[in-house]
Amino acid sequence: MAANTLASLTEAGADPLVLAADTEVATWAEHGGWRVKLEPDSDLNQAASRIPGSAGTWAICHADLPLLDWPDITAALQLLRTGRLVLAPSSDGGTSFLGGTLDSFPFSYGPGSFHRHLAAALSHDPVVIWRLGFALDLDDQSDLAAALRHPRSVLANVAHQ
């Protein structure tokens, strides 16, 4: 699934940087040819907070999105090119994609993060994008069951094995 996310980002014209919390993930990503930033002692919010300011335009896209494909990423990247802050919610209230050009942003990932991120973004004229590929993230068994049943899922073949 992570490889699919990275391939979708690359196919859409992005140059992904993998934020890895452990060396096993970092090694996997490096062997796949992707750039890696190892963040062993950081949670997601801490690691994400170091991204803005290090590049002109930045985006955080989660790797647990079994329905994601390159047109979803392309749509989000097109909105980023307008200079606006872009947010994509997951169906459970999380934030699957968040990007912009700000030098800093108060990341607040976790349950219900989309509304916290949107509230923090309101003074920056944000745009919300809703796409199927960003909607389903894998947080629990019911998400996995939905992904295994969905014909668009990169996991759909697993359900038939």
Image (tube, rainbow, N blue to C red):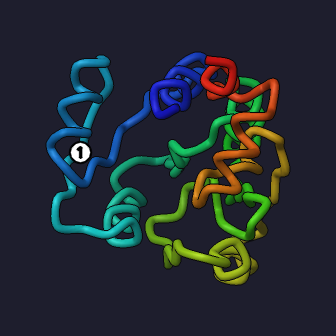
Check disc 1 and report its element: helix, strand or loop.
Answer: strand
Q: Amino acid at mark 1?
A: Lys
User: In the rendered image, which residue does mark 1 sit on?
Assistant: 37
Crowdedness of circle 1 by 10 Å Cα count: few (<14), some, many (20+)?
some
The residue under the point 33% across, 71% down is: 46
Image height of 31 relative to 1, above or below:
above
Q: Position of residue 72 (x, y in %)?
A: 75, 33
The residue under the point 23% across, 25% down is: 30
Q: Position of residue 71 (x, y in %)?
A: 76, 25
Instruction: Answer left or right for 118 relative to 24.
Output: right
Which residue is nearer to you in this view: 83 or 61? 61
The residue under the point 70% across, 35% down is: 148
Q: How many marks?
A: 1
Is residue 99 visible to the viewer in this orientation of the structure?
no
Q: Position of residue 82 (x, y in %)?
A: 74, 45
Residue that sits furthest to the front in the current view: 161
Image height of 12 relative to 88, above or below:
above
Image height of 140 relative to 8, above or below:
below
Q: Quadrant of residue 75?
A: top right
Q: Position of residue 60 (x, y in %)?
A: 51, 51
Which residue is nearer to you in this view: 86 or 64? 64
Q: Quadrant of residue 67?
A: top right
Instruction: Answer left or right for 154 relative to 2.
Output: right
Q: Quadrant of residue 121?
A: bottom right
Is residue 104 visible to the viewer in this orientation of the structure?
yes
The residue under the point 59% across, 16% down is: 11
Instruction: Answer left or right for 10 relative to 18.
Output: right
Which residue is nearer to you in this view: 67 or 71? 67
